[in-house]
Amino acid sequence: MPSWRHVTRGLRSLLNRSAADRDIADEVEHYFDEAAAVLRSKGLSAEDARRAVRLEFGHANNVQERVRAYGWENVVDTVGADLRHAARQLSRRPAFALAAVATLALGIGATTAVFSVVYSVLIKPLPYPNADELVRIRHSDIHGERSFSETMYLTYREENRTFASIGLWHETAGDADRPR
């Protein structure tokens, strides 16, 4: 989670880009100076230490660009630029803009309708308490035909040692899977 410092720095960058760029340049320059000082303390000359720092980290402008690209404000800035560009392009071609909006509206509407059906049929939990614990028991004979009599149901109900309770429903044409 970003700290308050990151948020305020990002807002400052969005509102005053040149000041934020100067801050980043100063910070990178300070970091380069500290890295060069460490190398000078190990015996390198000032010029050789500065060259070694540039070789290790790259040119200061490249480091500044990488630092600038790291913040969340860069994403906001990029999205804003993309939206401005899209608005300019769509205003130049209103017929295309209308066709694009209509296509998006139809696509979103169709997707919403399909998802609503899929949710209500496949995803939505059954209207029973602890619906995720329901189990369906089916019987079939050697020919694959389903057969389950009320006598079998009564036997299951009386001999049950595993399930909390047992229910029965009968499938008929036009009334598939309706509880009985």
Image (cartoon, rainbow, N blue to C red):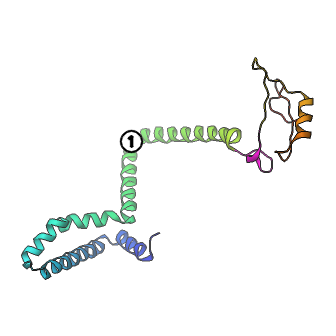
Q: Is residue 149 above or below residue 99?
A: above
Q: Quadrant of residue 121?
A: top right
Q: Which residue is mark 1?
A: 93
Q: Quadrant of residue 14?
A: bottom left
Question: x%, y% of residue 125?
Answer: 73, 46
Image position of 94 (left or right of 70): right
Q: What's under tag 1, amino acid-wise? A: Arg
Question: x%, y% of residue 65?
Answer: 25, 64
Magenta stretch: residue 134 in it? yes
Look at the image and give the residue range highlighted in magenta. Answer: 124-135
Given the current orientation, which residue lies at the most extreme top position?
Answer: 143
Q: Is residue 80 above or below residue 179?
A: below
Quarter of the rendering occupied by the C terminus? top right
Q: Quadrant of residue 155?
A: top right
Question: x%, y% of residue 56?
Answer: 17, 66
Q: Give the dominant element type of the magenta stretch: helix, strand or loop.
A: loop
Secondary-structure class at tag 1:
loop
